[in-house]
C-alpha cells in the first residue's frame, strides 16, 4: 500500500488523503472483480467511477491496473452537478498537480512489468523453438553437418535473447 497525502493550496490542511494498493501489474484488473481503478470519494459519496482520474494518467488504461481511493477533505473541491467529477477551480488543479506524478509512477511500473512479461514470453517461445529444432536435428532426418548448423543457429538465437534479458548465455561450441 502507498499512502497518498495532498496538501491544500494554503497549507493549512490536507486537501485529500488516500491509498493505492500496488500489485505485480500483470495487466488490467478484470471488470468482473468490481474493484479496480483509483476512485474519488467525498464524505461517504463516490464521485465518478473507476475512470474518474483517467485524464491524470499518461495512458488511461493504466488506471485499471491498480486499486485505490482518494478521499477529498478540502470543501473547496466541489463535485459537479452530475457527480462524475469536480468543478474546475484552483483547489482542484492543486489536487490534480499532486496526483499526476503519483499516477505517472504507476504508469512506469505498468510499462516495466509489461516489458518484463513480454521478454519472458519471448524467452519461453525461443526455448520451445530450440527444443523443437534440437529434436529435428536429433531425429536423423538431417545430414550431420546440417543438423549441427541448425542447432548452432537455434542456440545463437537463444543467447541473443538471454543477453537482451541480462542473463548468461549457453555455450555454443562443443567442449
Image (cartoon, rainbow, N blue to C red):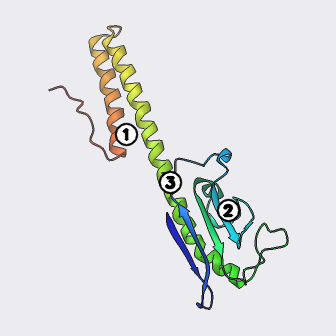
**What is the distance, in whole Å, between disc 1 and disc 2 at their CAs?**
35 Å
Where does the image place residue 103, in percent across and percent down from the top left? 57, 66
Residue denoted by label 1:
161
Position of the C terminus by quadrant: top left
In the picture as drawn, the residue positioned furthest to the top comes out as: 141
Residue denoted by label 3:
23
Q: Are marks 3 and 2 in contact (CB under 8 Å)?
A: no
Q: State the residue in front, 108 or 152.
A: 108
With 42 as the anchor, is 137 left or right in this view?
A: left
Q: Residue at x 41, y 25 (%)?
A: 129
Lower position in the chain sequence, tag 1 or tag 2: 2
Q: Residues within 10 Å of mark 3 (few under 14, many from 20)?
A: few
Residue denoted by label 2:
54
With 170 as the anchor, is 93 left or right in this view?
A: right
Q: Residue at x 73, y 60 (%)?
A: 49
Q: Residue at x 58, y 70 (%)?
A: 18
Lower position in the chain sequence, tag 3 or tag 2: 3
Q: Residues within 10 Å of mark 2 (few under 14, many from 20)?
A: some
Q: Are marks 1 and 2 in contact (CB under 8 Å)?
A: no
* Quadrant of the image occupied by residue 101: bottom right
Lower position in the chain sequence, tag 1 or tag 3: 3
Please tell me whether mark 1 or mark 2 is closer to you in this view: 2
Amino acid at each position: 500500500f502507498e499512502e497518498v497525502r495532498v496538501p491544500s493550496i494554503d497549507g493549512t490542511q490536507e486537501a485529500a488523503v488516500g491509498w493505492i494498493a500496488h500489485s505485480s501489474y500483470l495487466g488490467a484488473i478484470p471488470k468482473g472483480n468490481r474493484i479496480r481503478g483509483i476512485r474519488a470519494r467525498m464524505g461517504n459519496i463516490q464521485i465518478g467511477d473507476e475512470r474518474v482520474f483517467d485524464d491524470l494518467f499518461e495512458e488511461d488504461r493504466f488506471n485499471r491496473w491498480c486499486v485505490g481511493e482518494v478521499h477529498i477533505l478540502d470543501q473547496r473541491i466541489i463535485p459537479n452537478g452530475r457527480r462524475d467529477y469536480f468543478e474546475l477551480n484552483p483547489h482542484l488543479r492543486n489536487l490534480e498537480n499532486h496526483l499526476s506524478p503519483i499516477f505517472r509512477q504507476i504508469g512506469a511500473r505498468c510499462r516495466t512489468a509489461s516489458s518484463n512479461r513480454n521478454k519472458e514470453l519471448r524467452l519461453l517461445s525461443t526455448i520451445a523453438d530450440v527444443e523443437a529444432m534440437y529434436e529435428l536435428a536429433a531425429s536423423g532426418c538431417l545430414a550431420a553437418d546440417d543438423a549441427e548448423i541448425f542447432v548452432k543457429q537455434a542456440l545463437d538465437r537463444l543467447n541473443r535473447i538471454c543477453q537482451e534479458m541480462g542473463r548468461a548465455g549457453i555455450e555454443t561450441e562443443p567442449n
